[in-house]
């Protein structure tokens, strides 16, 4: 992914009353070195991020992403981001995104340089990968044990489950393991048999006409795309619900999708080698909606 634009932010306090933060942004060469060797985002993955899809120059679901950025900051004990400042940074970044087609804006907030005075923050813009094949042909997934029980997130909040952190080594290792097993992606399950989420996406199942997603009490990252799609489904008269789903629910589904901000809705064609029916017309309608301008 080749970066088109990069912006460094001088983070403002959450209660900063300014309405114009242009002076707190610094445009940098996206191909040039920019981070200190003491930066904790690279040394320890100590920070958070968001990926915002851009369609024909429009940043999608900006407010939902900013709210989740603030949520992750609270979980990680980072200084609360000034959302007005970040909102303006997203607008600047979107102006440098591809005017046609799809792109992605990344927001990164790090604890900063070790023993440094302030957090480090930056925004990047790049064209999005071509996800046509996943959206139209579907993906095969395998289930992988996440290594904890359903009650662990509540008992051990220091694990930062439910925050979108930069510590993505486990997520990437899960994707590599899925490919070793002949699949395209993975669905995490708890050690006591409950369904969670994918390494980089939310899971939606259709069972007996209801659209279900795993309840967020298992340390699941609340997906902005899943939330938007549920709202759309409810407007169409469908029933949606959050539920504690055991692994048997995966075999009960008459359709299933992984959904995320950039890939959008990818229908699942098989789980652990067992075929899953694909509702191609509904999937196409999902992606038409997700590609429409959404604030």
Image (cartoon, rainbow, N blue to C red):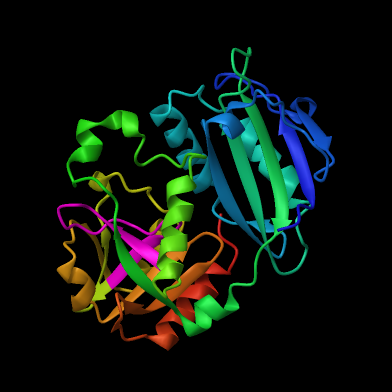
Q: Which quadrant holds residue 57? A: bottom right
The segment highlighted magenta reads 185-205
Residue 92 visible at all: yes
Q: What residue is rendered at 19% in x and 52% in y?
A: 191
Q: Position of residue 150 (x, y in %)?
A: 19, 47
Q: Is residue 243 left or right of residue 55?
A: left
Report the front residue among 25 and 175: 175
Q: Position of residue 258 (x, y in %)?
A: 41, 67
Q: Name the quadrant of the N terminus.
A: bottom right
Q: Position of residue 29 (x, y in %)?
A: 85, 41
Report the front residue among 240 and 279: 279
Q: What residue is rendered at 30% in x and 83% in y?
A: 276
Q: Is residue 121 left or right of residue 152?
A: right
Q: Position of residue 83 (x, y in %)?
A: 57, 33
Question: How many numbered circles are shown?
Answer: 0
Q: What residue is rendered at 32% in x and 28% in y?
A: 158
Q: Please say whether residue 68 is one of the residues in the magenta stretch.
A: no
Compared to residue 148, the image places residue 292 above or below, namely below
Q: Name the quadrant of the C terminus.
A: bottom right
Q: What residue is rendered at 75% in x and 26% in y?
A: 24
Q: Which quadrant holds residue 254? A: bottom left
């Amino acid at each position: 992914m080749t970066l088109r634009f990069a912006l460094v932010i001088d983070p403002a306090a959450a209660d900063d009353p300014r309405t114009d933060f242009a002076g707190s942004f610094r445009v940098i060469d996206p191909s040039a070195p920019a981070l200190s060797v003491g930066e904790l985002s690279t040394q320890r993955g100590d920070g958070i991020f968001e990926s915002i899809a851009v369609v024909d120059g429009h940043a999608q679901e900006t407010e939902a992403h900013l709210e989740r950025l603030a949520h992750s900051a609270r979980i990680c004990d980072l200084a609360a981001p000034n959302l007005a400042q970040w909102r303006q940074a997203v607008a600047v970044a979107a102006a440098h995104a591809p005017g046609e087609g799809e792109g992605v804006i990344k927001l990164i907030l790090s604890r900063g340089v070790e023993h440094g005075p302030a957090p480090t923050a930056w925004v990047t813009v790049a064209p999005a990968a071509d996800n046509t094949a996943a959206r139209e042909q579907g993906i095969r997934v395998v289930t992988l044990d996440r290594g904890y029980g359903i009650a662990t997130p509540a008992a051990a909040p220091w694990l930062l489950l439910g925050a979108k952190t930069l510590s993505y080594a486990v997520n990437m290792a899960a994707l590599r393991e899925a490919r070793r097993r002949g699949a395209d992606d993975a669905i995490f399950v708890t050690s006591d048999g409950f369904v969670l989420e994918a390494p980089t996406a939310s899971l939606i199942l259709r069972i007996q006409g209801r659209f279900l997603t795993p309840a967020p009490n298992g340390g699941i990252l609340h997906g902005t795309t899943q939330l938007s799609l549920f709202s759309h489904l409810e407007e169409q008269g469908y029933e949606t619900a959050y539920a504690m789903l055991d692994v048997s629910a995966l075999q009960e589904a008459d359709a299933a999708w992984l959904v995320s901000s950039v890939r959008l809705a990818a229908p699942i064609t098989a789980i652990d080698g067992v075929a899953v029916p694909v509702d191609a017309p509904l999937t196409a309608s999902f992606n038409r909606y997700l590609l429409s301008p959404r604030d």
